[in-house]
Image (tube, rainbow, N blue to C red):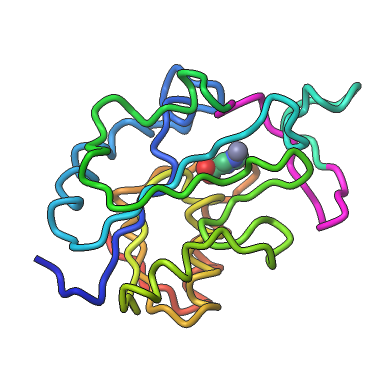
Amino acid sequence: MRPANEALIVIDVQNDFCPGGALAVPGGDEIVPRVNALLDEFQTRVLTQDWHPADHSSFAANHPGMAPYQVIEMPYGAQILWPVHCVQDTPGAEFHPDLDVAKADHIVRKGFRPEIDSYSAFFENDHETPTGLDDYLSARGIDHVTLVGLATDFCVLYSALDAVRLGYAVTVLEGACRGIDLNGSLEDARTTMLDARIVLEP
Ligand code: VGL
Ligand code: ZN
């Protein structure tokens, strides 16, 4: 068992990010057995759930003339437009059926405001609106987080960077993550995480 100051944060292991889903991450479902084993090792276990309204501004379908993976400028910065995914109360937004959801102590939903996306488990994409996760972890005396899940180069990356910024020691278990890899984003994410002194372990 890991010490009480460490938390496991499982990012977006949802149907839409697994093969067959609307924004499928290659091999996304392969991590589920390892994630379930990790859920037994930690005393504090948090899941995040991408949870968008149908009119969410990150969906290309909500911008006439735009296609998925094009980039638009939003008040908070550049935003990649995605296929419609993880719409609230749809099967695609549910956790992978084999994920041991019952072992989680806390579930953070994010991306539920139509006008702003939220990759990070800690802040929305304006980098200042908190999700409440930092308060939750602080209240439990957590100072080290281990991150796993989907996708390495988006929600895992942004969560890891925010965790460092908030003062946590951060480990990313790459073998329990899978990436989208948009124009080299997976390799860029590794470099960015290493530069931020995030510990990458297999
Ligand atoms: C994610 C793109 C859009 C993720 C979520 O979980 O990495 N990526 N929404
Ligand atoms: Zn999303």
- What x and y, as percent, mark residue 34? 20, 44
Res 13 quadrant in image: top left
> Is 132 above or below relative to 5?
above
Quadrant where the image shows the N terminus: bottom left
From this view, report whether residue 71 is shown above or below residue 128: above
Which residue occupies 28% across, 39% down?
Answer: 31
Whether residue 51 is in magenta: the answer is no
From the top left corner, tell me how far across and down residue 156 is, in percent. Answer: 47, 54
Q: Residue at image x 41%, y 43%? A: 178
Left or right position of 201 against 95 = left
- The percent position of residue 183, horizontal first and vertical second, equals 65, 44
User: Is residue 91 in view?
Assistant: yes
Determine the residue positioned at 48% across, 69% down. Answer: 134
Q: Quadrant of residue 86?
A: top right
Q: The magenta stretch spans which residues? A: 72-87
Vertical relation: 166 (above or below) 57: below
**Is residue 77 shown in magenta?**
yes
Which residue is most to the bottom?
167
Left or right: residue 74 compared with residue 17: right
Task: Work out whether residue 8 or residue 197 is closer to the camera in this orientation and state it.
Answer: 8
Q: Residue furthest left?
A: 1
Residue at the location (74% across, 42% down)? 80
